[in-house]
Every structure is written in structure tokens, then in C-alpha cells.
């Protein structure tokens, strides 16, 4: 049996877990389509690591506030990367935007 450290929840814990939930909601299927299979798999594993709302309500979680804060940073970076990939894919799909004639003539 694996031992997991338990940390008492604080107001900050609740805020951090809520922030993770909001970020996870923003990383929807359309963003994940731009990710590789490995990245999607890693995202799934990552989502399973952070505490649920019910764990927070119970008063103890398996991650410290500092660990949750670091996890938020990882999730934000992942979201930024996916957003860039999605934009790149859209550019490839639609091609470069035409330059207006007035600009091209100048």
C-alpha cells in the first residue's frame, strides 16, 4: 500500500483547486485536438493528480498549496502551448491572409 501525504485544506487550497478547475474547463476538446496523443495522455494523468472538490470539502488533500501552485503554472503553460498550436493549425488550414491592395501598393 502506497502512503500519500495528507495536507489540511486552507482557503488558499480552495482557491487553487478552483483555479485548476477553471483552467481545465478552458482546455476543452478543441484545444486538445491540437495536442499530440502523448500530450493528451499526459493531460489526462495530470488532471487525475489534483484534488477534487469533495476532497477539499473533506478537509485534507494529497497536495500542498505550494504543489498546487506549481501545478497551476504547468497547466497555464500547457494551455499557452495548445493555444499556439491551435492558431498554427488554423493558419495552415486557412493559409496566410491576403494583403489588402492599398497596403500592397504602398
Image (cartoon, rainbow, N blue to C red):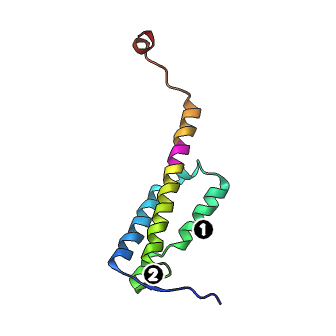
Residue 54: % across, % down? 43, 80
- Answer few, some or many: residues within 10 Å of disc 1's Cα (few below 14, many 20 plus, some between 14 and 19): few
Q: Which residue was labeled with disc 2?
A: 55
Q: Is residue 50 magenta?
A: no
N-terminal-most mark, 2 or 1: 1
Q: Is residue 84 magenta?
A: yes
Toward the left, the furthest residue is 11
Name above or below for residue 17 compared with residue 77: below
Q: Is residue 4 left or right of residue 76?
A: right
Q: Which residue was labeled with disc 1?
A: 45
Identify the residue at horizontal 41%, vertical 80% (top origin).
56
Identify the residue at horizontal 56%, vertical 85% (top origin).
4
Q: Is residue 35 left or right of residue 53?
A: right
Q: Is residue 8 left or right of residue 86?
A: left
Q: Which residues are magenta?
A: 82-86
Mark on residue 79? none
Is residue 28 in view from this perspective?
no
Q: Quadrant of the N terminus?
A: bottom right
Q: Quadrant of the C terminus?
A: top left
Is residue 37 in view from this perspective?
yes
Name above or below for residue 15 compared with residue 36: below
- Answer few, some or many: residues within 10 Å of disc 2's Cα (few below 14, many 20 plus, some between 14 and 19): few
Q: Is residue 11 left or right of residue 90?
A: left
Marks 2 and 1 in Cβ contact (< 8 Å): no
Amino acid at each position: 500500500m502506497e502512503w500519500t501525504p495528507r495536507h489540511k485544506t486552507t482557503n488558499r487550497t480552495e482557491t487553487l483547486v478552483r483555479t485548476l478547475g477553471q483552467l481545465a474547463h478552458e482546455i476543452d476538446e478543441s484545444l486538445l485536438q491540437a495536442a499530440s496523443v502523448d500530450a493528451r495522455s499526459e493531460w489526462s494523468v495530470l488532471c487525475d493528480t489534483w484534488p477534487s472538490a469533495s476532497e477539499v470539502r473533506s478537509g485534507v488533500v494529497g497536495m500542498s498549496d505550494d504543489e498546487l501552485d506549481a501545478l497551476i503554472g504547468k497547466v497555464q503553460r500547457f494551455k499557452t502551448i495548445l493555444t499556439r498550436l491551435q492558431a498554427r493549425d488554423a493558419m495552415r488550414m486557412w493559409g496566410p491572409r491576403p494583403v489588402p491592395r492599398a497596403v500592397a501598393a504602398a
